[in-house]
Image (cartoon, helix red, strand yellow):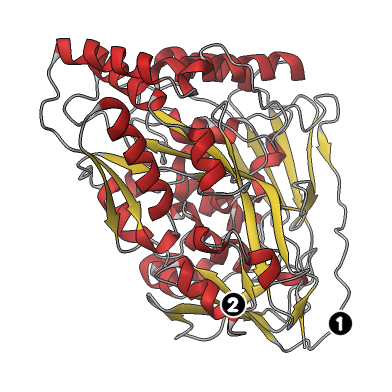
Amino acid sequence: MKRSRIGISAVALLSASALALAGCSASEAPAEGDSAAIITTNGSEPQQSLIPTNTTETGGGKVITSIFAGLVSYTADGDVVNEVAQSIESEDGQNWTVTLNDGWTFTNGEAVTSDSFVKAWQYGALLDNAQSSSYFFDNIEGFSYDENSELTGLEVISDTEFTVALINPEADFPLRLGYSAFMPLPEVAWEDLDAFGENPIGNGPYMLDGEDAWSHDVQIDLVANPDYDGVRKAVNGGVSIIFYTSQDAAYADALGGNLDILDAVPDSAFATYESDFPGRSVNQPAAIFQAFNMPYYLEHWSGEEGKLRRAAISMSIDRAEITEIIFQGTRTPATDFTSPVIAGHSDNLAGAEVLDFNPDEAKKLWAEADAIAPYGDTVFDLAYNADGGHQAWVDAVVNSISNTLGIEAVGKAYPTFKDALNDRDANALTGATRAGWQADYPSLYNFLGPLYVDGAGSNKEGYSSPEFEQILADGASASSVEEATAKYQEAQEVLLVDLPSIPLWYSNVTGVYSDSVDNVVFGWDSVPLYNEVTKG
């Protein structure tokens, strides 16, 4: 199937007239405390080996962004600052010249060069390599969803300079380049990429603490990279990311002084976490969207019948009550498919009434779907990972669906996030699946393209809409902020009709930290800035 080539745009965040990203430095955290101290924090077992172009979930993402440095990185507020790049410049928004800073090395001593980026991007984009982040390169000339094709738009000029030719002009191309898919790889990676993924060598503020640093399903230990001198220089000695089987267990460790930072308070502690950690907790908006998806490959969930059932399910959920009772002010009912912290978010889209609790309309639509093909005694199940603190809201959602529609609706727990993702990837789901999204970079498009474009790596349930993709493409190449935003909102109005995902709510980051650490800042994407944390 031919698929549209869509670039990424968030022109609301960068001026189309300022087509250069100049070098700048981020503010440094005060170097107080023990520079050798190890920070402990929560995480989850990465689904894949740690190859940047094949890592799209939060467990692996925390590690990748800690041990690699890209052309740019993001501040706590989501601003873009140059890291390995000295400059990223264009006169027309379509043809870009990237100049690297001298002196960058990987932790094995290899120099970071233009080849380090270009080879990694070429590998990530090639169809046969089946990298989950391949679609992030689809705006570069030569990309193909249908056949092996090199990125002809990449050209190495020298060790410190390469050029990028895009399919269409995009004034904000640099915005995406801090995402993990765009990280460089050393030459040693190509000797045995599988082995490299188990013990990766990066160029970031941290590095793995020896060959046994990754104890699968237990934790991964990172230490500060002594040769790193970029904008994210660590003021501590390292980070140990501990993989918990439940958020309650992680919270208990935090209460007991055995965990320094927890970035996901369990719902069981929503009433007490602020008093449990006086002055050491946060509840702030983050670029996180929560939903659940119904696979199109399942009976009853495609075509006109599926469209009716999706709308009925959506209107049978009392989001306001669930966010108030279960989440106690740490979630906000969704009005679109993005996040309120991203420029261009809307709470007034046409068709958004499908996200309102409307039992009568839900029953009516369900009956219309039954007239096409009776649902009968089929059980509606909603899959979730038990290690992520989701059971309470899943139970509330399926109860709301069951009570409204008179069907049997249940939660389906997987032990770990990795287990749940594996069944999603294998098209082995028996019903709905939890489908949260934490932004990769601060852009409206990032909530839309990766999840709903046909062939995109995170479009796991089989949605395809040429109409949606064309509108999205129009927004990506828009010539003004207003035009781009309008197109992205129009594209979401298509989603509100099709409902490939059932929007639930936006998440705040609710985190706590012990009195052993200071300078704890949670970023725009909910992840703590580990390099700034002091201890001791």
Q: Is residue 236 above or below residue 454?
A: below
Q: Is residue 193 above or below residue 391?
A: below
Q: Is residue 175 left or right of residue 393?
A: right
Measuring from the top left, give residue 504's x and y in whole percent.
48, 35
How many C-alpha atoms fall within 10 Å of the one at disc 2: few (<14), some, or many (≥20)? many
The image quadrant of residue 515 is bottom right
Name the element at disc 2: helix
Comparing labels 2 and 1, the label whose residue is closer to the camera: 2
Which residue is depicted at the point 72% across and 35% down? Answer: 96
Q: Is residue 51 visible?
A: yes
The image quadrant of residue 308 is top left
Measuring from the top left, give residue 435's x and y in whole percent.
42, 42
Q: Nearer the viewer, residue 148 or 284?
A: 284
Which residue is label 1 attached to? Answer: 32
Name the element at disc 1: loop
Which residue is depicted at the point 66% across and 68% down? Answer: 512
Q: Quadrant of the N terminus?
A: top left
Measuring from the top left, give residue 416's x and y in whole percent.
34, 63
Give the numbered dot on residue 254. 2
The image quadrant of residue 281 is bottom right
Three-letter residue code for mark 2: Ala
Which residue is depicted at the point 55% across and 66% down? Answer: 63
Measuring from the top left, give residue 501's x and y in whole percent.
41, 31
Q: Nearer the viewer, residue 387 or 183?
A: 387
Q: Quadrant of the C terminus?
A: bottom right
Give the numbered dot on residue 239. none
Rounded to the nearest whole Å, what is the CA distance between mark 2 and mark 1? 22 Å
